[in-house]
Amino acid sequence: MRVGDFLLTCWFSAVLFITPCVAFATEDDGRPSFWIDLYRGEPVAYEDMLDDLAGARVIYLGECHDLERHHDIQTRIIADLGQRSLPLVLGLEQMEFFQQSSLDRYNKGEISFDQLAEETRWSKRWRNYRQYRSVLEAACKFGAPILALNARSETIRQIARSGGLDKINHQARRELPADIRLGDPLYEKLLNLRMMVHVCASPERLRPMVEAQIARDEAMASVLCSFLKSEQGKNRTAVVLCGSGHVAYGLGTATRVRRRLPGARDRIILLSESGDAKLSPEQRAMAREINITHEQLRAINRPIADYIHVKSLNLNND
């Protein structure tokens, strides 16, 4: 895997540095795009995929955070599910739990998107927040509550940098779910491979980084499942926007939601970069080239998602 290839998952930047990956999307250049059903190994019509999604309780839309094309697709899926009169709730990795009161006010129409961003200092905590405007507007149009799923970024940073979950202060630990299960060999194996892209990563530092990622996954799953079990959420279908690394292969957040909602049907959608992403100079300075082999990924022994959206490769974007 080349340095630039790591943007496909673009989740590990949030683990240590608590900022989304920097990726620059090309404008619509006429390249053909299509959906693939990864269980059948065949292209699938968008409407057929939508039929399947409509029967799920939780739908994950795994993104590379700064690719505008990904947010356009997310907006379309939410709007098209809403057109079917499907009761929805939108869950956001991109907002932290303590911002929920402002998000509720936005959801009720009491404040504008810009006022929401100002109240929550969103630009300081998630740089490309403006790209989510159309997604939030689509959710509001169809009466979908919006949930701030993420843990406090300072807490996740503290776990990664202080030596692990048991090293953080009492106040920070109280903000996280009581039930955090750190034992996840398959997920840890995948994270160990991918997190080595960080220049600062070393074998002895990997475990706290893994625990930080798991703590974030557990926090998001806890907020989402608490809502879905509530009176307000019990008949709703959740659409979750998150970095693809939180749900790829059904691991991460997806595993932790399944533990809390046994038997709930879910669908995982990943949105490919297709050559549209590149590293910023700052991120290139923090990254190293890594190689993840086909054999290492095959050892996971499951498809990376239910569906993936692909554009023909942009060969002009190195």
Image (cartoon, grey):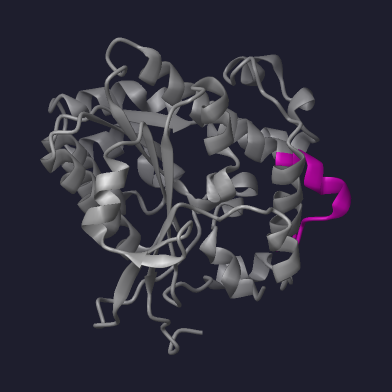
Q: Report whether 304 appears left or right of 148.
A: right
Q: Residue at x 62, y 45 (%)?
A: 15
Is any atom of residue 64 visible in this view? yes
In the figure, 96 relative to 175: above or below? below
Q: What is the x, y in percent for residue 151?
A: 53, 30
In the figure, 116 relative to 248: above or below? above
Is any atom of residue 198 visible in this view? no
Give the residue furthest to the front.
40
Q: What is the x, y in percent for residue 276?
A: 41, 75
Q: Residue at x 49, y 22 (%)?
A: 261
Residue 162 lies in magenta, yes or no? no
Using the image as rendered, state which of residue 69 and residue 133 is in the foreground: 69
Give the residue furthest to the bottom.
316
Q: What is the x, y in percent for residue 260?
A: 53, 21
Residue 200 lies in magenta, yes or no? yes
Q: Residue at x 25, y 49 (%)?
A: 50
Using the image as rendered, state which of residue 73 and residue 260 is in the foreground: 260
Q: In the rendered image, which quarter contains the N terminus?
A: bottom right
In the figure, 194 relative to 105: above or below? below
Using the image as rendered, state which of residue 139 and residue 103 is in the foreground: 139
Q: Which residues are magenta?
A: 196-210
Q: Residue at x 84, y 55 (%)?
A: 202
For residue 166, which quarter of the picture? top right
